């Protein structure tokens, strides 16, 4: 409804590049203009009739072509680059690096458990990984979009048992310009399910076993990353783009308030 009010012009289309597709449930960090249009203001006048002239983001949408100068084009380019930078940080920093760092640390801990002869800890960790994979398979039926190509679905299903689906989805999302909803589902499964099981098993193992100092250090890092992943998963309930049970959160985009909330989510998860 709001998008129909946007004037069909170059600067409006450029600003719209940062807005996720309407049919996708995206938690990407959008541009300030995108967040303003998706935010709580139900009536955003972008045609110049009653818009807040003190807001440069809304004022820019009502500018005529002859009113645009070099400074405006530079400002628009910087806005676009800011969105792209935050987008790439989310895809390759949060999703890719965070996911595979947890996977590698869990593999290292399973090798350590096997060296100590604790096969039951290895089995419990693998059980958590298996449950997360099954959860992602079930979620595929809910998060795959009608316009997703069939080859993409086939590749994701093939790579999922090998834990390589996140790498593929990160590359696919980068090309598409929006995080695929299945990417969020995979990270949620790894954080809330696999991360919880790994944190419980590894914490108990470090308490009940007299490990070498090197193995203990790796275990502490692995447990810490699991707790951080759990915090990240529950932090999505506070984001306007994600929310919980259809109710949006309060924070929009790269809101510093999320960092404050995370300080309270972390002890809540560790307890």
Image (tube, rainbow, N blue to C red):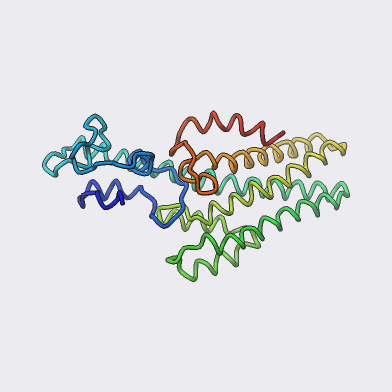
Please identify the quarter of the rendering in which residue 267 is found. top right
Left/right placement of residue 159 relative to residue 151 reads right
Residue 73 pos. (x, y %): 22, 40
Q: Quadrant of residue 105?
A: top right
Residue 93: x percent and y percent? 52, 43
Counting labels gives: 0
In-image side of 100 versus 250 (left or right): right
Q: Residue at x 65, y 61 (%)?
A: 162
- Residue 20 to residue 147: above or below: above
Q: Nearer the viewer, residue 108 or 102?
A: 102
Q: Is residue 42 left or right of residue 266?
A: left
Residue 97 located left or right of residue 73: right
Split into 4 quadrants, where in the image is the C terminus? top right
Q: Residue at x 47, y 47 (%)?
A: 27
Q: Is residue 185 above or below residue 157?
A: above
In this view, the residue in front, 162 or 7, is: 7
Q: Residue at x 56, y 39 (%)?
A: 235
**Residue 117, percent from left and from top:** 88, 49
* Image location of residue 165, percent across then percent down: 57, 59
Say which quarter of the image contains residue 167.
bottom right
Q: Is residue 73 above or below residue 263?
A: below
């Amino acid at each position: 409804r709001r998008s129909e009010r946007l004037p069909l012009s170059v600067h409006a289309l450029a600003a719209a590049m940062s807005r996720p597709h309407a049919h996708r449930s995206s938690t990407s960090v959008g541009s300030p203009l995108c967040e303003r249009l998706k935010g709580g203001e139900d009536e955003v006048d972008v045609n110049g009739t009653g818009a807040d002239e003190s807001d440069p983001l809304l004022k820019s949408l009502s500018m005529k072509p002859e009113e645009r100068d070099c400074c405006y084009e530079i400002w628009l380019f910087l806005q676009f680059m800011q969105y792209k930078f935050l987008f790439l940080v989310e895809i390759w920093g949060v999703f890719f690096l965070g996911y595979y760092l947890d996977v590698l640390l869990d593999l290292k801990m399973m090798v350590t458990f096997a060296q100590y002869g604790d096969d039951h800890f290895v089995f419990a960790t693998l059980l958590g990984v298996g449950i997360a994979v099954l959860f992602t398979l079930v979620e595929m039926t809910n998060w795959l979009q009608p316009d997703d190509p069939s080859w993409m679905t086939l590749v994701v299903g093939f790579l999922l048992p090998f834990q390589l689906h996140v790498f593929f989805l990160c590359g696919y999302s980068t090309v598409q310009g929006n995080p695929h909803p299945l990417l969020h589902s995979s990270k949620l499964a790894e954080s809330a399910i696999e991360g919880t099981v790994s944190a419980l098993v590894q914490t108990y193992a470090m308490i009940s076993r007299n490990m070498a100092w090197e193995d203990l250090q790796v275990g502490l890092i692995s447990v810490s990353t699991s707790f951080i992943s759990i915090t990240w998963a529950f932090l999505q309930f506070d984001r306007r783009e994600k929310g919980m049970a259809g109710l949006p959160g309060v924070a929009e985009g790269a809101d510093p308030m999320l960092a404050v909330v995370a300080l309270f989510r972390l002890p809540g998860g560790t307890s």
